[in-house]
Amino acid sequence: MTRRQAIKTIAATGALTALSRIVPQARAATTAPARDSFRHSVCPGPYLKRNADDKRPGRLPLPEFAQAAKKLGIESIELTGPEQWPVIQKAGLTCAVSTFPRKVTSLMRGLNRREHHIEIVPAYLQRIRECADAGIPNLICFSGRRDGQSDEEGLEICAEGLKKILPAAEKARVTLIMELLNSRTKGHVDYQCDHTAWGVELVKRVGSERFKLLYDIYHMQMMEGNIIQTIRENHQYIAHYHTAGNPGRNEFEPGDMQELNYPAIMRAIHDTGFRGYVGQEFSPKRDPLTSLAAAVKICTV
């Protein structure tokens, strides 16, 4: 073999080697599903039959609702528990946010009292293990009622409780998310984590990537408004979003008598780089699945 032939052989071999690397990469790039937006989730309460005697129109058993949700492009049925996850996963869906351990905590009995930690901490450690086993990424938690407590004391005690739970959450790669709720309406009166600034300060004090906020657009419109700017300035502290129209907590289609511009809000969320889940949490006034389909369409960016 001459020197020139040897050079040609080496060059051809190098080209084939490079091609063998490029082709599989190109094939993977064309076959991998594109995901340049956030995902759709739904809170199931308004859509499920409570029992066999529940005759409300449009309500379905969980297996049937899961199939219907999937057809609408929804990937998650959230605020569900371990007993419901196998049914949801069998339908090809997931649960974006686990419900809380109901026997020991609630919106109004949360982490802002040290005496609550005795029961809440072990219950959350157990639920974290369950989430990890089932591949559930987020677990909701609450501040609790002020009941005369200062915001500073609430921050201090909530941070103490969370720091007892978060080492396990970090190890299991499960994110605790505290929901921002209004503190005015029935069932929410006096709730402490009722402003974005308070929640953001708590996230900063805890200092863990496994603790963030659930930003409920409806509730924060009631408490402070300025939704889009608030999201733009604080998106790094938010792991999940909830939707509903205001006033009324119902549908939010263009032309409805409500004050939130959801197409603009969804574009703002998308523009922050958020690629997690947005959960529908409104109470439909008409056929539930019709309203849910419309909401998913509005919130698709």
Image: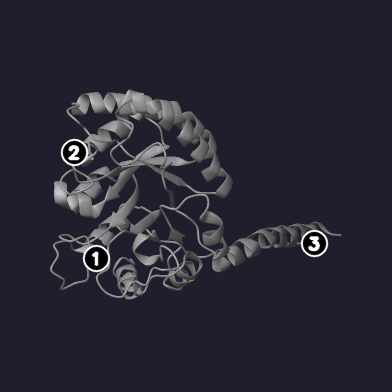
Residue, x 52% and y 45% (percent of image)? 131
Q: Is residue 123 left or right of residue 113?
A: right
Along the line of sight, which residue is nearer the eye, 57 or 86?
57
Q: Which residue is mark 1?
A: 263
Q: Is residue 296 above or below residue 208?
A: below
Instruction: Tell me the residue at 39%/68% (across/down).
Output: 54
The local secondary structure at tag 2 comes to: loop
Q: How far is disc 3 from disc 2 in space, using C-alphas?
A: 84 Å
| Nearer-N-terminus badge (1/3) | 3
Marks 1/3: CA–CA distance: 64 Å
Residue drawn at 26 percent across, 57 percent down = 268
In this rendering, would 75 be left or right of 109? right
Q: Are marks 3 and 2 in contact (CB under 8 Å)?
A: no
Q: Which residue is mark 3?
A: 5
Amino acid type for the residue under numbered disc 1: Pro
Circles 2 and 1, Cβ within 8 Å, touching? The answer is: no
- Residue at the limit of the structure toward the front, as seen here: 53
> Dot 1, crowdedness within 10 Å: few (<14), some or many (≥20)?
some
Q: Which residue is mark 2?
A: 190
Tell me the residue at 57%/68% (across/down). 31
Q: Position of residue 147 (x, y in %)?
A: 20, 31
Q: For residue 225, say whether it is visible.
A: no
Rendered position, 12 above or below 183: below
Circle 1/circle 3 CB separation < 8 Å: no
Q: Earlier in the sequence, mark 2 or mark 1?
A: 2
Label 3 residue SS: helix
Q: Is residue 150 visible?
A: yes
Given residues 238 and 189, the one toward you in this image is 189
